[in-house]
Image (cartoon, rainbow, N blue to C red):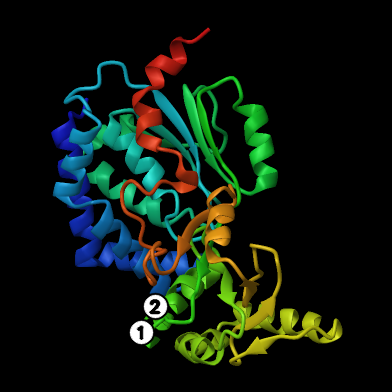
C-alpha cells in the first residue's frame, strides 16, 4: 500500500522526468504525434508543461492534500473507472491524478486518440514503484468499479448516464470557452488571446470558440495578432477544414473575415468548427456575462475581469472540468456508497 507521502514523492519524480525530457519521453511524444495528427510536438509539449507546472509541484500537491485532509493511509480504497477523452494531449491526466492522490484505485479506459502518453508515464511509475500496478490499471471495458468518471460528447454522455446511473459518478458533457472583448485590449493581450483560440487547434473545452464584441469593434488588430498561427496552413488536416468551412460560407453568400488561416463569422452558436471562430455583437456586457455564467456549456470566460488572456489552457489545480470538484467527490465516495 502506498501512503500519501510516497504517492506525492512519485508524482514529483514524474514531473521531473517530464521536465528533463528524457529519451523515453521523447520517444513517447514522437509515437503519439505519429498516431494522431492533431497532437503536434508543439502542443504535446504545452500540455506536458501545464501538467508539470500546475499539478506536479511538491508544494501544490502537499497543499491540496492538506486542504482536503487526505489521510496518510487510505484504509478502504475504492476503484474508480475513468473513461478518458482524447481531444487534446493527456486531457484525462487530472482525473487520474485526483484518484491517485486521494488514495483510491483507478481503472482507465483510454481514448483511441490518446493512448500513448499517459500510458507511458504510468509505465515509468510501474518501473519506479511496482506497487503502483495495484493502484492503477487499464481496461477496454470498465466493469466492477465502485464509481466512475467519464468524459465525452453530449451523445456519449447519455450512454454514460445510462450505464453508470447505479454508481456514484461524474459525467462530463461537451463544453467550450468564450472571450468577451471591450475594444481596449492591448496588442499583447490579443496575441495571448490567439493562444486561447488556436492552441490544440481549438479542440479543447478550454479553447475559446466564440467572441463577444461591442458594436463597431475593429477586427483588424485581432486578425493580425492571430497570424501568430499562420503556420497552421502547413497542417493538412487543419487546411482541409479551413478550405471546407470557407467553401460553405462562399456557397451561402455569408459575410466572413479571414487573415488567410482562421475565419471569423458572425453566429449566435457557442461551438465553432475547426479553423473558424464565431463572434457576436453585444449591447450590454453585464447581461452577456450573466447569461454565460448560467450556461452549462461554458467552461470559462476569458477577458478583462475574468480568466486572463492566454491562460485559458493553463488551469490551476482547483479549476475542475465542468466545475465539478473531483477531489470532493472522491473523498466522499464512502458516503455515496453507503446510501441505499
Q: Residues within 10 Å of mark 1 (few under 14, many from 20)?
A: few
Q: Nearer the viewer, residue 293 or 116?
A: 293
Dot 2 falls on a residue whose secondary structure is helix
Picture coordinates of residue 100 (x, y %)?
31, 36
Describe residue 275's horizontal placement relative to residue 60 as left or right. Answer: right
Please report the residue visible at 39 percent of the width from the left and 87 percent of the height from the top.
187
| Residue furthest out toward the top | 340
The answer to whether residue 24 is above or below residue 213 is above
Residue beneath disc 2: 192
Picture coordinates of residue 118 (x, y %)?
39, 52
Please report the residue visible at 57 percent of the width from the left and 47 percent of the height from the top.
294
The answer to whether residue 207 is above or below residue 182 is above
Q: Nearer the viewer, residue 285 or 250?
A: 285
Q: Can the viewer see residue 8 in this picture? A: yes
Please report the residue visible at 74 percent of the width from the left and 80 percent of the height from the top.
244
Q: Can the viewer see residue 128 in this picture? A: no
Q: Are marks 1 and 2 in contact (CB under 8 Å)?
A: yes
Residue beneath disc 1: 188
The answer to whether residue 184 is above or below residue 331 is below
Q: Residues within 10 Å of mark 2 (few under 14, many from 20)?
A: many
Please report the residue visible at 63 percent of the width from the left and 74 percent of the height from the top.
279
Describe residue 121's horizontal placement relative to residue 217 as left or right. Answer: left
How far apart marks 1 and 2 lie (CA) works out to 6 Å
Amino acid at each position: 500500500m502506498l501512503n500519501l507521502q510516497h504517492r506525492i514523492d512519485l508524482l514529483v519524480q514524474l514531473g521531473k522526468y517530464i521536465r528533463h525530457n528524457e529519451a523515453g519521453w521523447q520517444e513517447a511524444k514522437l509515437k503519439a504525434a505519429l498516431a494522431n495528427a492533431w497532437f503536434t510536438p508543439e502542443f504535446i509539449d504545452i500540455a506536458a508543461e501545464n501538467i508539470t507546472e500546475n499539478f506536479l509541484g511538491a508544494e501544490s500537491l502537499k497543499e491540496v492534500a492538506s486542504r482536503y485532509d487526505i489521510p496518510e493511509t487510505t484504509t478502504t480504497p475504492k476503484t474508480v473507472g475513468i473513461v478518458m477523452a482524447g481531444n487534446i494531449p493527456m486531457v484525462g491526466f487530472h482525473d487520474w491524478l485526483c484518484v491517485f492522490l486521494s488514495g483510491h484505485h483507478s481503472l482507465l479506459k483510454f481514448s483511441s486518440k490518446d493512448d500513448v502518453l499517459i500510458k507511458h508515464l504510468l509505465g515509468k511509475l510501474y518501473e519506479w514503484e511496482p506497487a503502483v500496478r495495484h493502484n492503477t490499471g487499464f481496461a477496454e471495458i470498465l466493469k466492477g468499479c465502485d464509481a466512475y468518471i467519464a468524459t465525452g460528447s453530449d451523445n456519449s454522455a447519455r450512454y454514460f448516464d445510462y450505464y453508470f446511473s447505479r454508481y456514484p459518478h461524474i459525467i462530463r458533457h461537451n463544453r467550450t470557452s468564450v472571450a468577451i472583448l471591450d475594444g481596449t485590449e492591448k496588442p499583447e493581450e490579443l496575441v495571448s488571446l490567439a493562444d486561447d483560440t488556436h492552441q490544440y487547434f481549438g479542440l479543447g473545452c478550454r479553447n475559446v470558440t466564440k467572441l463577444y464584441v461591442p458594436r463597431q469593434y475593429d477586427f483588424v488588430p485581432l486578425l493580425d495578432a492571430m497570424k501568430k498561427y499562420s503556420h497552421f496552413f502547413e497542417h493538412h488536416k487543419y487546411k482541409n477544414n479551413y478550405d471546407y468551412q470557407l467553401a460553405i460560407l462562399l456557397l451561402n453568400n455569408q459575410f466572413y473575415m479571414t487573415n488567410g488561416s482562421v475565419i471569423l463569422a458572425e453566429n449566435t452558436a457557442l461551438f465553432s468548427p475547426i479553423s473558424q471562430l464565431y463572434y457576436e455583437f453585444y449591447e450590454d456586457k453585464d447581461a452577456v456575462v450573466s447569461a454565460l455564467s448560467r450556461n452549462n456549456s461554458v467552461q470559462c470566460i476569458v477577458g478583462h475581469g475574468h480568466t486572463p488572456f492566454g491562460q485559458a489552457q493553463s488551469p490551476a489545480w482547483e479549476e475542475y472540468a465542468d466545475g465539478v470538484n473531483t477531489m470532493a467527490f472522491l473523498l466522499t465516495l464512502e458516503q455515496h456508497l453507503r446510501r441505499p
